[in-house]
Amino acid sequence: MATVAAVKAPTKTNLIYGFAPYQAKPDEEYMNSAQLQHFKNILNAWKQELMEEVDRTVHHMQDESNSLPDPNDRATQEEEFSIELRTRDRERKLIRKIDSTLKTIDNGEYGFCEECGVDIGIRRLEARPTATLCIDCKTLAEIKEKQTGG
């Protein structure tokens, strides 16, 4: 099993959804129960934040849906609602991805590249907790995407 190197102490500026970066111990096994719990906490906090934003949007749209007499004001409001709904749709998809990631934690598959099986890495996962590819495989996928145009 791979080990994780120790890192510097956390500061307030580098909290991840309210959690300090994981402090690995020397010779600690990769994706042990403490690390998995750390990522579960991050993912659940992220999901909760997104769900609260959905609730705020619903309340905002209900509160603001009064009929405005001016057609320009109505058009502006409708455009704002449209943008907000597109944003919420992206967040809804992200919530599904978070749920899927939480399942990979429960299945014991979290933290390993889907393509090559190597460790994705603690810092990469803290930057993007839903990552499924190591940085090398992700880079190759992006290069292929650019070459094929899609």
Image: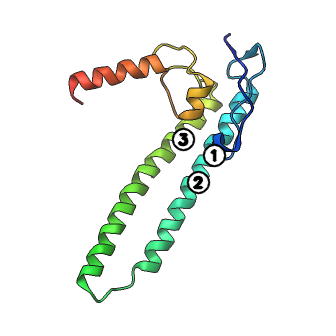
Name the residue type under label 3.
Ile
- Residue assigned mark 2: 49
Residue 76 is situated, as x and y percent measured from the top left of the image, at 29, 73
Q: Which residue is mark 3?
A: 98
Q: Is residue 112 above or below residue 88?
A: above
Q: Estimate the spatial distance between the alpha carbons at disc 3 and disc 1, rounded to whole Å.
A: 14 Å
Name the front one of labels 2 and 3: 2
Helix or strand or loop: what does disc 1 sit on? loop
> Which type of secondary structure does the marked residue at label 3 adopt?
helix
Of labels 3 and 1, earlier in sequence is 1
| Residue underneath mark 1 | 17
Q: Mark 1 against mark 2, which lies toward the viewer?
A: 1
Above or below: residue 9 compared with residue 46: above
Real-space Cα separation, disc 1 to disc 2, in angstroms: 9 Å
| N-terminal label among 1 and 2 | 1
Residue at 64% over, 25% down: 108
Residue 57 image offset from top left, x and y in percent = 48, 66
Marks 2 and 3 in Cβ contact (< 8 Å)? no
Relative vertical location of residue 31 with respect to residue 128 in this rendering, above or below:
above
Circles 3 and 1 in contact, beta carbons < 8 Å: no
In the rendering, at what x and y percent does residue 88 appear?
43, 57
Q: In the figure, is residue 122 to the left or right of 84?
A: right
Callout 1–callout 2 Cβ contact below 8 Å: yes
How many labels were placed on the picture? 3
In the rendered structure, which amino acid carries the disc numbered 2? Answer: Glu
